[in-house]
Amino acid sequence: MTKSELIAHLAGANPHLRQPDVELIVTTIFDEITAALSRGDRVELRGFGAFSTKARDPRTGRNPRTGEAVEVSAKSVPYFKPGKELRERINKPAPAPVRLAARVPA
């Protein structure tokens, strides 16, 4: 689902809100998560998961085109750990399909 699809879905599910208002809400939430991560904070949404950053050490990489060794500097990368409720909902077994018996003409 893309950001625009999320906004359209939320606007459809909440007819009392205008689409520009929903777009502002979604953008504000994403901006706040981004700002918190850039400060080094952790963002936890109960039942959904936690966003944090992980430090990556400097390393020697390879240019895939030339095979030449390239130094890659240390950096922080975003990390998401799903919450228990999200994992359970994703891994819930799908219901068995209903099989209809063939109709025999009388």
Image: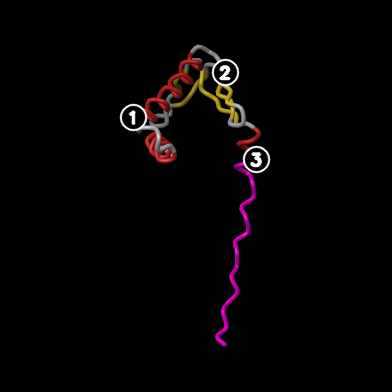
User: Dot 3, crowdedness within 10 Å: few (<14), some or many (≥20)?
Assistant: few
Q: In the rendered structure, which segment of residues is drawn in magenta?
A: 89-106
Say which label, 2 or 1, has the lower sequence index: 1
Q: Please report the residue visible at 35 percent of the width from the left and 33 percent of the height from the top.
A: 19
Q: Which residue is mark 3?
A: 88
- Based on the displayed image, in which of its 4 quarters is residue 12 positioned? top left
CA–CA distance between discs 3 and 1? 33 Å
Q: State whether residue 91 is above or below residue 76.
A: below
- Pointer 2 or 3: first along the chain: 2
Left or right: 19, with 10 as reference point: left
Residue denoted by label 2: 42
Question: What sort of colour scheme is used for the picture?
Answer: secondary structure
| Left or right for 81, reference 13 | right
Residue type for callout 2: Arg
Residue 28 in picture, x, y percent from top left = 42, 22
Q: Is residue 78 visible?
A: yes
User: Element at badge 2?
Assistant: loop
| Of the pair 106 and 78, the residue shown nearer to us | 106
Q: Secondary structure at mark 1?
A: helix
- State the image coordinates of residue 46 (x, y, percent, origin top left): 61, 27
Query: Number of marks in the image?
Result: 3
Q: Amino acid at mark 1?
A: Pro
- In the image, what residue type sits under mark 3? Glu
Label 3 SS: helix
| Image coords of residue 84 (percent x, y) | 66, 33
- Residue 65 figure quarter: top left
Residue where numbered disc 1 is placed: 20
Q: Quadrant of the N terminus?
A: top left
Q: Nearer the viewer, mark 2 or mark 1?
A: 1
Callout 1: few (<14), some (14-19), or many (20+) C-alpha neighbours within 10 Å?
few
Q: Are marks 2 and 1 in contact (CB under 8 Å)?
A: no
